[in-house]
Image (cartoon, rainbow, N blue to C red):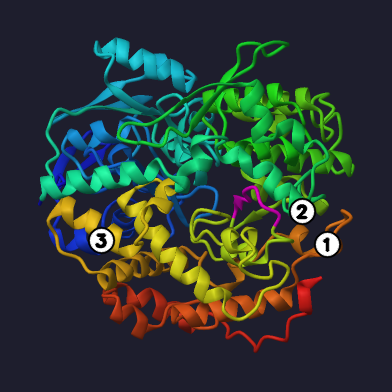
Amino acid sequence: MYSYAGKILRVNLTTGEIKTEPLTEEVAKQYIGGIGLGIKLLMDNSVPGADAYDPSNPLIYLTGPLSGTMGPTGGNSYAVVSKSPATGGIGNAESHGFFGPDFKRAGYDAIIITGKAPKLSYLWVDDDKVQIMNAEHMKNFTVNHTDHAIREELGDFYIRVSAIGEAGEKLCRFAAIINDEFRAIGRSGMGGVMGSKNLKAVAVRGTHDVNVANKPGFIEFVKLIHERMKGPSTKKYKTLGTPENVLVLNSLSALATRNWTNATFEGANKVSGEWLNEHYVKKIVGCATCGMRCDHIAVVPEGPYKGSTSRLEFECLWSMGPLCGVDRLDAIIEAMRITNEYGMDGISIGVVVAFAMDLYEHGIITKEQTDGIDLKFGNAEAMIAMIHKIGKREGWLGSALAEGVAKAAEIIGGDAYKYACHIKGLELPGYDLRTLKTAALGFSVSFRGACHLRNGAYSPDVKGKVNRFKIEAGRGKMITDESHMYNIIDSLIVCKFSRGTYYDGWKDLTNYYTLATGIPITVEEMTADGDRIENLARLFNIREGKGTRKYDDVPYKIKNFPVPDEGPAKGVCVNDAEMAVGLDDYYASRGWTKEGIPTIERLQKLGLDKYAYIAEKALKETPPVQASAPATVGGA
């Protein structure tokens, strides 16, 4: 095969056994690579019902078919898939930068890591030479310190490292894996899984060529995409970056503020993309092979956090800014810096701190329980102090919050669950679902939990393509179609920021794939691949007891705390009746039952017959859903 390495590496950290096996063309074409291949390998190599932190749970590193090529955004990528310690279902995340290309050039499409090392270790992949190395001396190192220590130890500055920090070692359920200083395998707790295996890092050096099937055609296509990247489809990312969303969402009463208490933030101008770029951004850089340059590197010029430096995207700016009631960019940059050093998800950490602030404001936790931290909304110093506690699992509250809001609410007890904003155990991203109801439906059915990147359901709401204050028939099909595209994007592992450059949509993606791999694929076949990946992910979640209708829901606060802000969104929230209508519509569009279980006929059509037993068992054990009542207009 061209472009693919055609090889999967297996590493058992318990026994030290290392071996390889082939990747077949059939599996490659059906699952593409990235998260698609990862979900397939997870299903086939995991023990049903095993805990995410059990040594048998595989941590799977993956490349895509474009990784290691000159392909824009796809050439610089990798992904990680495992069972999530946050949700108990599919965990996945993707990252770009410089680690992915070397991983592919080392000669592998995937690394399946199982077992648990007897002591803290790192995996050193030097082309065909693979070793498990001692990392005991790196215990509690920051991610950046680990990166530098490994390069120095191995004597090569150009080695690429993907590592965890202290939070991953201490099994924080939203710990991240970081590469290239700011780039994160961020969501769903993959860093915690890595920590549970006593694995501090994966270091790679790859020297093999990655050859494409049609070199002249591939080069011409790459030139075309680079030209499109100069145009309006990527302007947002090249100028203000995703922090442009702050004022856009604030104007729509869709900027979740103070843990989804308000939908607008009075300090939005102080934390806007415009203010950030004018006063803090010092340079804008790009990943290998990418023509966009979207990395906005911010530096604090003065004050208590002078010199603090971090890459700042909207979601993280929002979670540690408006969601916590903080309007100080210097503090937000510092909070992001330490979040990266501990190795934590920059979205989840802000949601977790905002949850604790909400509990503190309502008297559910006390100042004694916070170890004297005055955890009020807007207290930037308190936010930073709590991030340190969570990263270190320090104190009762720090340890509880490192479990994520779902499990922390159980530990804290009482009414804490009412303030825990998550779906399936994963903290919500930066959109107020009360005023973006297509997003509410789309986030609820995401296979990795609360996620804006599984189907892009926020887009029609924000762009005014639908009435965002209601859920109605047709939204399910909209979400279904988009999810197939997103699954393929994350299996090719091209950056979602580049999706606007594929003017011909599916035709461009199939062309990209075939030029690289030499494997002919039609639009219909690639669309079916996206559908197959979605159904297999659903089956995995069902197998693990997390995949039926009752898990496709939005948080208590989204349904029971109407928007208080003056304006067109005042009084709006999501109700059960409209969610029921939306779920029925979505399941029908997928060919699933009303309980959210794929039908046997659907699975057979997608070539998933061997997994049909999971659906058959669930159909027998899941109580039937009653007919939905008519939804209240507007859901208010």
Q: State whether residue 114 appears in this view.
A: no
Q: Which residues are magenta?
A: 425-432
From this view, report whether residue 548 is shown above or below residue 28: below
Q: Amino acid at mark 2?
A: Ser
Determine the CA span between mark 3 and mark 2.
Answer: 38 Å
Q: Is residue 222 magenta?
A: no
Label ID, residue 510: 3
Q: State whether residue 540 appears in this view.
A: yes
Residue 383 percent location from the top left of the image: 73, 29
Report the residue at 85% width, 29% height from top: 368
Q: Amino acid at mark 3?
A: Thr
Q: Bin the neighbour count of mark 1 within 10 Å (Cα to Cα): few under 14, some 14-19, many 20 and up.
A: few
In primary-sequence order, the first of circles 3 and 1 is 3
In primary-sequence order, the first of circles 1 and 2 is 2
Label ID, residue 160: none
Q: Bin the neighbour count of mark 3 within 10 Å (Cα to Cα): few under 14, some 14-19, many 20 and up.
A: many
